[in-house]
Every structure is written in C-alpha cells, then in structure tokens.
C-alpha cells in the first residue's frame, strides 16, 4: 500500500487505487487475539455486541463512497447549539478554541502578510492548510466566519506572551549559514510570520514538491539517502525529493514551476504549543464541564477538580464521542483514553481525598458495580439513586442516606469527595483483599549480577555503595515516620546467593542455591527485613559483596531463575513487592529461560521481522503471569555491551508494571550519574502494588482494548503487579449501541491496590465526555497528543504480530482517512487541491511522521535490535506528556538565554534549518539530552558554560556540565533540571560539536528533517498525506 500511498508514488500520474481500498484494520492490525468482542461484564452485550464496530475484524469499513462521505454540507453553516442536561452547557469548545475563534476576516491578509507573500512568492506551495474550515466555528459563537481566507495557523495571535520574546527573536536562522549549504533558499525570518502563513494562498495553486535531495543538507554531512520508509523504497523507486519526473497528472502547473514547499507555511508544532500556552498557561483549569478539552500537556496550569478527573490522570483522543458506530467508522478517529492513575500532582494542586465508609465499604451500583461518583443521580428524596453508567435504580444504604436540596442535590454534596470530585480514594474493606485478610506491606528485593564483567568494571561496587544511601529513602505513607517496606538481597551469576541480614546477626550469612532448574528460597526468617532495624548488617553486606566476588571468573549468568527466586521469596512472605535486578549479559547458563543469540538482521524487512520483538522462549511469558498473580513487580537495570535479547529479558518487567532501564556500554565515568539518578528515582517513586484496574462506561460503548504494562487474564480486568506514577494505560473504546447527546459518555476507572504501607485502597477516576451526531464536534474536541499516544501504542503492540510495512501503511491510511473525512464533511467547500486540516489535528501529520520514523517502525539494519525492542517497551507504558516529548523533542536555543529570567527560552522546530552556527541548542526527548554547539558559538557563552576559552577547547567527553560560577552556567543547568523534572528517565547529556562525527546521532532527533536512516521529512510527508486525501476525495 505505501507504494501506492505516500511513499513511493514515483510520478503522480500513475493511477493508483486509493487508500480507501485498504483501511480494513481501522486502527487495529488484525491481531487475531482480539478478534472477538469480549462480553462486557458490566453490561449485557447489546444487539451490536459481538459484531460491533468492525474493530479488529479482518474487514473494515468499506471504501469511502457515498455512504461514508455523503453527508457533506449538512452543517456547513454551523451546527445547532448542543443540549446538555445537568452540567452546564459545554463552553469548552469555545474556550479551547478561543485563540482561533476570533478569526475575523479583516485580519487577513495583513499588510505584513502580504509582503511576506511577495517575498516568498515562488516558494509558496499550493497546499492550503486551513486551521479549520469555516464550518468548524465553535458552537455558541454565532455563524462561522466568512469562508474566505484559509488560515494556515490560525488567526493573529493574542499579544505575545513574554515567553515568546526570546525565541521569536532568534528563530530565523541567518539567511546564509553554512548549515543551509550553498544553493539553499534562505528562509524568511519567521518573526515576520507569527501566524505561520500569512493570508490566503492562491486558490488554484499547484502542489509543489520539495527540492532535490541534498539541497538543504548541511555542509558537514554525507549526502542523505532519499526519504523512505524501508523496503518499499529500495531500488530505483523515486522518493519525494525530486521524484516528480513526469509531471503528475493530478498536479496543476508545469514541472518547471515546482518549487520548494516552505516549511514555515505548514503547521508548526511549536506554534501550536505556544498558542496554547499563551491562552491557557498559568490559569486555573476547572474540570466542571462535560466534554471540555483540557490544555495541552505542554501547557502549565493549575488543575482544579470540580467533578471530572484531572487531565493529569486521564486524557482522551477526543472529548466528544460520535453518537453512532457508523459515524465512528466514517471518521476513523480512535476513541481512547490514556489513563495514568497514579500521576504525580504538583504541590499547588489538591491531593486525593480518602473516603472511609468503615465496614460498609464503598457504595456501589448493584448492577454494574460502578462506584459512587458525581454521575449518580439521587431521587425520591434521597432514598434512591440512579446509576449514570447502567441506569439501574439503587436503594441508598441507610448509613449513606442524606436529604436533597431544592435542586435535587444531596445536602452533603460538597462534603463528600465521591459526590463532587472527579478523583478520590476509598479505603477498601476485607472483601477487596486477597483471602479476605489485610495485605502485608510490600518488600523490595535487590538482585545483583556479580559475574566477572560487572565486578571488573566496578558496577557491583557502585550499586552496593548507592544502595546504602537510597535505602534511607524507601517510600512510606505520608503520616508515617519510617517505611513499612522490607528489603532483601540476592546476588547471582550462574547460581544464586541469598543473604540473611537479620538484625541480631553480627555478620550477614550467605546461602547458595545451585539448583537453578528448580529454585527454592533457602531461608525465610532474616531474608526480608526492616531496613532501619538491620541497617548495620545490611551495610556490612553491601561492603562485602564486591570483595566476595572479586576473584570470580564466572561469565555465565542465569536470569529467569533470578525472577523466580524473588517471586517465591515474596510469596513465602505473603506480600507483594518489587524486584530490582541489575543485569548485564545474555543469560546463557544452563537454566530455564536460557537464551541464545538470535539477533538476525536478515529478518529485517521480511514478514518475519516481528520475531525480533517476540521473546525467544515462552518461559518469560509464564513467569510474568506468575509474577502478576503474586503481586511481584520486576524492574530491570540492564548494562549490555552486546546483544542481550531485550525482547525476552524485558518481557517480565513490562507485563508486571516494572520499568526497564538500559545503559549501553556502561562506562563508570560517563554513565554512572544517569544510572544512579534512575535508581534513586525508581526507588522513591509513588507506587501501588498488587493492582487491578477496571474501566466502566455508560451504556452504548465499552472498553475493548488495553495497552500498557499490564496483564489480562480476561477481557475486562487489567492486572498489574504494580503501577507507579509514570505508567499509563491506554484504553480503546468501541460502540455497542447508540450514544445519546443528552446523557454523554461516562468513564469510571477504578484501581484496587495495596499502598506502600500495606493498606488496601481503591482509587477512582471519573470523566464525562460529550456525544454528538455532528462530525464537526468530534473533530473539534480531538487531542492530537493523545491520538499519537494511542497510535504509537497500538502500532507497537501490533509489531509482535504484523509485518511492519503493513503497520506503517495502516498508520498513513488512517491519518489520511481522518483528515479526508473532515475535509469532506466539516470543511467549507473549496478547491480540491487545498489541504484543510481540522484545528485540533493541525500537527497530526508531523507527529505521525515522527512515529513512522521511530526506530521501532523503521526497518533498518543500522539500528540495534535491542534498542528497537527497548524503545518499543518504553512507549507502551508512556503517558501523553512523555510520548509527546519522545516523538517530538524539545529544542531550545540556549544562546538566547535571558539569565535574569527563570522561564525557558521558546522552543524551536526540530529541523536543521533552525540551527545556526552562531548558536548553542539544547535538545531533549525524555531519554537523551544533547547540547549542540555551533562552530561559531559566542566565546563568552562557551566560557560561561564550560569554563574554557573557545569552541575548540570544549571537551565532549562529559555527561555533566561543569559547575561554573557564571549566570550562563547556572541558568543553563537550571533549565536542564527543569526539563528533567517530572520525566521518568534520567536523560544522559551528550555534548555535540557541529561538524564532528557524533553530530550524526544528534541529527536523528531533528524529526522534521529527512531521517538519517530513512523516513521522510515533514514537508514530504505532508505532501504525501495531502495526495492520499485528494485520492480519497476523488
Ligand atoms: Zn450501574
């Protein structure tokens, strides 16, 4: 398909079957394991139950025909105001789009814009990117604006916030920097074009291709291969740049007029982020309105829970669900929620209230078992309530009775968190505990690989030293002085060593288990201990471990038996817990879970490539299952110097809610800081154990698929050995009946878990969404960052079963479908050549292209198999903020630092053309951080940051900036720590000098450019998507 689609398509003149022929998957990838619709437990499968929205069925929506796209114009003049009972009418749409709504036609074209048009002249492409069609004006704002000027990036901005100032001054690279290379067209200063593109472009302009390959490349780089998505581009097929030899049929205009598409004219992620910051940043966001679209994840604001869960806990791909499954199929917008139940809440927001009904336990609907929440409607003077999820009318338990006021609300409405808040916790009764007895507090077991190389490179000593410190910081209940978590220690190579660290011992005692085929725990008493009580014995042990194995020549290790031992130790102690495993090599010793090196690059670009992502034995799968059953979470710190089969070793951490950290070719002086930060952070982070999550919905739709660090024994219960503050579960919903505009769509996520202190609790998050029979409402309420999170996880899950080529095609197809459906049904009539994007999805193409270029989906032998498996696993548990940064890194111009200000400089777009050799730039994606130094970096900055006189003196052999007593140094280090804050992984800093070899690594993160190992530039991808859309519309 991609050959017909956006990738290959040598000349446009080839007649191609539209991508409409291939969307059978509808966001799924034919994963056979999901072929059936699970019988929802909370509500009977409706008439549409098992056959409901095609979902994972092998056939999907039919090709777009009149049926799918036949409703054009129905609401071109704006749609009727929505009616909502209960909660106040949704003004969220209006508020979220406020920055764009005042788009009075008179603002366009402005004189400035006109001059820029003139200036750009020939550069401008024919692609008209409309922020939203004139039919898309928010409801309640009167008739939509005149259908004239297609906006590129929204109307004129409100006064620029201060944060914009520094960035906008430096954004435009000097016209002729070496980076642009000879012959490259100088970019217009972007300060002239705050709105991205000034004014309307000619209606019948042609589609204009980008320049030939190499034209925009920097001088220091080897020539780039053509953009491609892997195999399909091999051989003589033409890629985008310059790939229009014949003058495509669909394109107007002769080839000689083909010009470069100006990157400034296409939607800028940075502009979208800055606009949202400008309008919503620093404000209080109250969650009192159903279907309200929250500020972007990149916008700082204060969230106030007024009846719906904070977006820190739940974000949705759209906050307005289509009323029918037909509409959902038509738009192909995934309906999904990204739920981060233990998200960290800033100190200026209210922590969750704890509700305790004593022996009565939580109040729940008799039929669907939903928990008491703001969506329950009290009736009959307060004696009964109607469930908002299943509509069942329940008696109010006597202990819970309360009179109603004149508007039918309970008098204690504001005194009870479960009546007035979106999120809260319940104390769980014994009914919610295993074996009906209170759980024991969790335990942490530290398991250190003491094979030869780990001893020799000093890693074992480093870990032992650090543990002495971090054990002081074990997590505890807020009201407690000390942690209830017990600790235990195991070392291993091809045998296991258990340690007795009981407090009354003078010396720790070691017990060796050599039978790794059937591991048993040789001691119970003295293995798991209270750290404070056994501190001296533990320190004694940690001092001795590096010496103990100093003479060991053992190179072989086991792995599965290590997990098995830890799990059995927890089981024997009857407590949940977490294993911290520090491991370095492929486990080749004779034992269950033994692995061989099966890395085979020949599989790349074949249908068998998926094997590289699958575990090589099913031992780990069943081990993970056992671990989850016993509340045993596994976190793995990997220090590989060669292939270690991450796909196999990482499986148990992933399925048990643990974390995988990987430090390639670990070097003590370069990498220890990153590792130690990760270790400290991981031990201290907020976490719940032995968790089970259930997502309930109101009638008409239900949760059908789950993505994350989870394990599922049935179709509804999401089991997690543990879940911490950084882990998110993405849940997809499907219709099983019609949704009502009045009642909306309600979601309740309940997580039953054990706290670090051993209390059993329920954490409840509620969210109400709108429903509409107007496609425009659906598009208006989308959140691109959440969409990308969903697409990434569903695609990365699919790589286990599907050829990557198919997955890439599906992603492109679905992107085009979503946008074509909007164009057809929601945008005002305009020339077919126009690309019109819904405002909420303006940057979907650029983000989608970033996802397609990620090494997981990019079939390239240059990228290590382990790295691909690793990134796949990371993304599977990411929340929206982390996936946004991961796929579109933050790039900051450091040379514009205002050392008197604490605000970050405004970010710039991730493209080489935005760099300048006089500049210094900081790039971060959540895993890596780069400080890029232009060859002509100002010496005073170099001096200030590195304390050396010039660029030439800067050593790149450092992962920490020196602490120089200079404002530049202090401000830069502060900025780096702000970026690092709230991120689950410690980012390793790499210093990159322009035109030196390591720059190649850095360049991979300039995601708007052509990929180093393939993958198109943003401009090319947008052209491709546009073409796909045109085909769909034709
Ligand atoms: Zn119910």
Image (cartoon, rainbow, N blue to C red):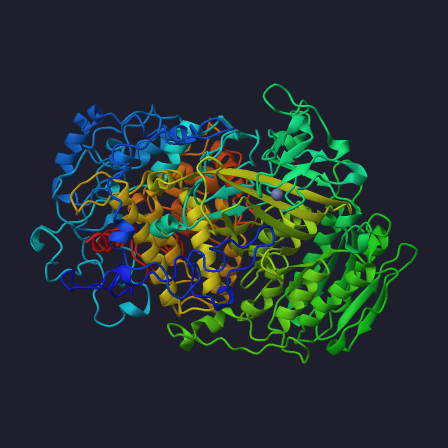
Residue 416 rendering spot, x and y as whole percentages: 68, 29
Q: Nearer the viewer, residue 264 or 90?
A: 90
Q: Decide if residue 44 is in sight here.
A: yes
Left or right: where 644 falls relative to 443: left
Q: Is 373 above or below relative to 407?
A: below
Q: Nearer the viewer, residue 398 or 1028?
A: 398
User: Quick one: which residue is furthest to the top in this view?
Assistant: 406
Q: Quadrant of residue 104?
A: top left
Q: Decide if residue 350 is in sight here.
A: no
Left or right: where 651 falls relative to 498: left
Q: Nearer the viewer, residue 622 or 412?
A: 412
Residue 826 rendering spot, x and y as whole percentages: 28, 41
Quadrant holding the N terminus: bottom left
Residue 841 rendering spot, x and y as whole percentages: 35, 43
Left or right: where 168 falls relative to 376: left
Q: Is 1024 above or below relative to 97?
A: below
Quadrant holding the C terminus: bottom left
User: Quick one: which residue is furthest to the front in this view?
Assistant: 380
Q: Quadrant of residue 633?
A: bottom right
The quadrant of the rendered image in which ligand 1 is seen is top right
Q: Quadrant of residue 217?
A: bottom left
Residue 844 rendering spot, x and y as whole percentages: 35, 47
């Amino acid at each position: 398909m991609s050959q017909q689609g956006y990738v290959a398509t040598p000349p446009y003149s080839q007649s191609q079957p539209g991508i409409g022929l291939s969307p059978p998957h509808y966001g799924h990838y034919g994963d056979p394991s999901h072929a059936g619709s699970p019988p929802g437990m909370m509500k009977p499968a409706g008439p549409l139950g098992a056959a409901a929205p095609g979902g994972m069925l092998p056939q999907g929506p039919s090709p777009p025909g009149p049926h799918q796209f036949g409703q054009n114009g129905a609401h071109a003049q704006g749609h009727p105001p929505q009616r909502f009972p209960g909660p106040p009418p949704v003004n969220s749409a209006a508020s979220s789009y406020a920055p764009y709504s005042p788009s009075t036609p008179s603002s366009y074209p402005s004189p400035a814009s006109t001059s820029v048009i003139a200036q750009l002249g020939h550069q401008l492409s024919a692609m008209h990117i409309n922020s939203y069609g004139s039919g898309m004006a928010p409801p309640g704002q009167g008739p939509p604006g005149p259908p004239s000027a297609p906006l590129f990036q929204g109307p004129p901005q409100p006064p620029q916030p201060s944060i914009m100032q520094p960035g906008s001054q430096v954004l435009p690279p000097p016209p002729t920097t070496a980076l642009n290379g000879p012959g490259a067209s100088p970019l217009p200063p972007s300060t002239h074009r705050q709105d991205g593109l000034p004014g309307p472009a000619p209606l019948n302009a042609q589609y204009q291709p980008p320049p030939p390959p190499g034209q925009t490349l920097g001088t220091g780089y080897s020539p780039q291969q053509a953009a491609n998505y892997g195999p399909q581009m091999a051989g003589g097929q033409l890629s985008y740049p310059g790939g229009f030899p014949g003058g495509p049929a669909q394109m107007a205009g002769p080839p000689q007029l083909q010009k470069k598409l100006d990157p400034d004219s296409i939607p800028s992620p940075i502009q979208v982020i800055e606009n949202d910051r400008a309008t919503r940043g620093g404000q209080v966001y109250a969650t009192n309105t159903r279907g309200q679209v929250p500020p972007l994840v990149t916008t700082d604001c204060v969230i106030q829970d007024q009846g719906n869960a904070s977006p820190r806990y739940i974000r949705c791909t759209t906050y307005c669900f289509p009323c029918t499954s037909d509409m959902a199929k038509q738009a192909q917008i995934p309906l999904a929620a990204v739920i981060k139940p233990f998200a960290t809440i800033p100190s200026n927001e209210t922590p969750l209230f704890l509700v305790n009904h004593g022996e009565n336990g939580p109040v729940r609907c008799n039929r669907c078992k939903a928990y008491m929440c703001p969506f329950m409607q009290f009736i009959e003077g307060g004696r009964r309530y109607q469930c908002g999820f299943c509509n069942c009318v329940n008696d109010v338990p006597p202990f819970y009775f309360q009179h109603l006021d004149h508007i039918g609300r309970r008098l204690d409405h504001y005194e009870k968190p479960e009546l007035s808040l979106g999120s809260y916790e319940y104390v769980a009764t014994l009914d919610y505990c295993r074996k009906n007895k209170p759980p024991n507090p969790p335990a942490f077991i530290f398991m250190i690989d003491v094979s030869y190389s780990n001893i020799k490179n000093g890693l074992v000593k480093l870990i032992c030293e650090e543990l002495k410190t971090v054990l002081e910081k074990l997590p505890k209940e807020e009201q407690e002085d000390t942690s209830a978590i017990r600790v235990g220690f195991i070392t291993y190579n091809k045998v296991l060593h258990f340690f007795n660290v009981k407090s009354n011992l003078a010396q720790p005692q070691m017990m060796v288990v050599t039978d790794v085929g059937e591991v048993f725990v040789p001691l119970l008493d003295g293995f798991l201990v209270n750290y404070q009580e056994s501190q001296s014995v533990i320190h004694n042990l940690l001092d001795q471990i590096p010496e103990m194995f100093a003479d060991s020549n053992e190179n072989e290790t086991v792995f599965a038996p290590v997990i098995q031992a830890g799990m059995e130790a927890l089981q024997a102690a009857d407590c949940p817990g977490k294993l911290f495993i520090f491991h370095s090599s492929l486990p080749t010793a004779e034992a269950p879970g033994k692995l061989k090196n099966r890395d085979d690059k020949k599989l790349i670009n074949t249908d068998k490539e998926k094997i590289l992502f699958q575990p090589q034995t099913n031992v780990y799968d069943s081990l993970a299952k056992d671990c989850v059953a016993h509340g045993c979470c596994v976190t793995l710190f990997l220090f590989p110097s060669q292939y270690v089969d991450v796909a196999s070793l990482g499986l148990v951490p992933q399925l048990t809610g643990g974390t995988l950290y990987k430090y390639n070719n670990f070097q003590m002086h370069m990498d220890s800081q990153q590792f130690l930060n990760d270790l400290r952070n991981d031990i201290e982070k907020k976490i719940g154990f032995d968790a089970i999550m259930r997502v309930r919905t109101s009638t008409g739709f239900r949760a059908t698929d789950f993505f994350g660090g989870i394990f599922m024994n049935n179709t509804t219960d999401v089991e997690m050995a543990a879940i911490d503050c950084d882990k998110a579960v993405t849940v997809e919903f499907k219709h099983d009946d019609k949704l009502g505009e009045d009642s909306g769509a309600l979601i309740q996520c309940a997580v039953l878990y054990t706290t670090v202190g051993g209390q059993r609790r329920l954490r409840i998050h509620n969210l109400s969404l709108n429903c509409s029979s107007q496609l425009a409402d659906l598009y208006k309420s989308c959140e691109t960052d959440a969409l990308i999170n969903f697409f990434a996880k569903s695609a990365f899950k699919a790589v286990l079963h599907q050829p990557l080529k198919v997955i890439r095609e599906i992603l492109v197809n679905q992107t085009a479908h979503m946008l074509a459906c909007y164009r057809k049904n929601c945008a005002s009539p305009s020339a077919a050549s126009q690309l019109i994007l819904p405002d909420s999805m303006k940057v979907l193409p650029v983000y989608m292209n970033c996802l397609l270029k990620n090494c997981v989906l990019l079939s390239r032998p240059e990228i290590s198999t382990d790295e691909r498996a690793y990134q796949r696993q990371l993304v599977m548990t990411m929340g929206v903020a982390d996936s946004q940064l991961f796929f579109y890194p933050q790039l900051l111009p450091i040379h514009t630092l205002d050392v008197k200000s604490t605000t970050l400089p405004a970010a710039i777009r991730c493209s080489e053309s935005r760099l300048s050799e006089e500049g210094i730039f900081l790039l971060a994606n959540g895993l890596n951080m780069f400080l890029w130094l232009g060859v002509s970096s100002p010496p005073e900055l170099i001096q200030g940051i590195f304390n050396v006189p010039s660029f030439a003196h800067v050593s790149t052999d450092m992962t920490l900036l020196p602490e120089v007593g200079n404002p530049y140094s202090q401000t830069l280090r502060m900025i780096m720590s702000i970026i690092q804050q709230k991120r689950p992984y410690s980012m390793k800093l790499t210093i990159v000098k322009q035109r030196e070899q390591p720059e190649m690594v850095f360049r991979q993160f300039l995601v708007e450019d052509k990929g180093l190992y393939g993958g198109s530039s943003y401009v090319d991808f947008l052209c491709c998507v546009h073409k796909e859309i045109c085909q769909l519309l034709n």
